Image (spheres, rainbow, N blue to C red):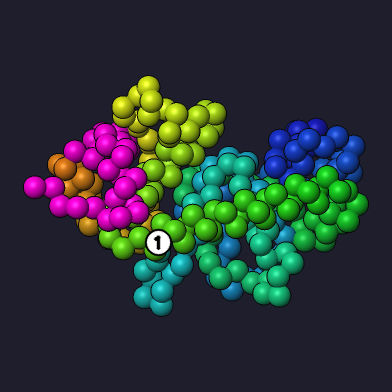
Amino acid sequence: MKKICETLAATNLFAGLNHDTFHEYCGKTSIRLVWKGEVLVNEGDPCKGIGMIIDGQLAMQKYTSTGDFATLELLGAGEFFGEYLIFGNKKSYSVTIEAVTNSKIIFISREMLLTLLNQNPGIQQNFLTILSDRIQAQNKRISLLSQKSLRQKIANYLLELLREQLEKEGESPKTVRKTVSTQAVELPVSKEVVSRLLAMPRPSFSRELISMERDGLIRVSGRVIWLLDMERLERGVIEGFQAVI
């Protein structure tokens, strides 16, 4: 039980709280190991609580009647699923959630979560922060998918990866450009998964990467992509890319 308490304490829901706040609930939860490709939630399933990703990566998928699917969102360690359904009128999942890699998940039932929220203002504040982060992530997703061309979508995605990377390092693209002319990002998943995340066929994604490399915007080395011309990438996302002559 000590391991469970320590694991819970490291999550955003219980961040900054004394173990005594939730110690009695540690024995009512457990760490679940899920395997790559395993489905945790099917579309239409009722939301019975929240899931906290301790390790690994999950994908929110939208399937068609023919079995094709689009990846709507990737969730990694420290992120949650189901939290946006706890207080909504609709409490059923509209997506399928499956493991992209072997993962470790902690589930907290809706009843337990409501009790914790009612008893502790600190947990309430943490939960509101989680919901706020979810809204911001959805806004970024909408911005990505609203891009008109494949190149704009890819550039937007790569620049967002860079911003997230630099934020973790306490930097920003603007300050880094003053000293470093190029930056590299690593795709968090395979190109196949990224192409689905960007709502484009895998061959189209590969062709556009080659075209962007030919135009001097990026350099690709496996999953690592060097951003060679930050100014053109940023301007292209907003204004559209002009043909290179």
Residue 125 pos. (x, y %): 78, 49
Q: Nearer the viewer, residue 110 or 186?
A: 186
Asked if residue 201 lies left or right of residue 132, the reply is left
Question: What residue do we see at 22% from left, 57% from top?
Answer: 204
The residue under label 1 is which amino acid type? Leu
Using the image, determine if residue 193 lies above or below residue 96. Answer: above
Q: Is residue 6 visible?
A: yes
Residue 78 pos. (x, y %): 62, 42
Q: Which residues are magenta?
A: 216-245
Using the image, determine if residue 232 lies above or below residue 151. Answer: above
User: Which residue occupies the extreme top position in the image?
Assistant: 179
Residue 227 pos. (x, y %): 30, 36
Residue 197 pos. (x, y %): 40, 56
Question: What residue do we see at 67% from left, 50% from top?
Answer: 130
Using the image, determine if residue 157 lies above or below residue 229. Answer: below
Question: Is 79 within the magenta?
Answer: no
Counting the numbered discs, the total is 1
Describe the element under mark 1 as helix, strand or loop: helix
Residue that label 1 marks = 145
Asked if residue 209 lies left or right of residue 135, the reply is left
Question: What residue do we see at 70% from left, 70% from top?
Answer: 88
* Quarter occupied by residue 92: bottom right
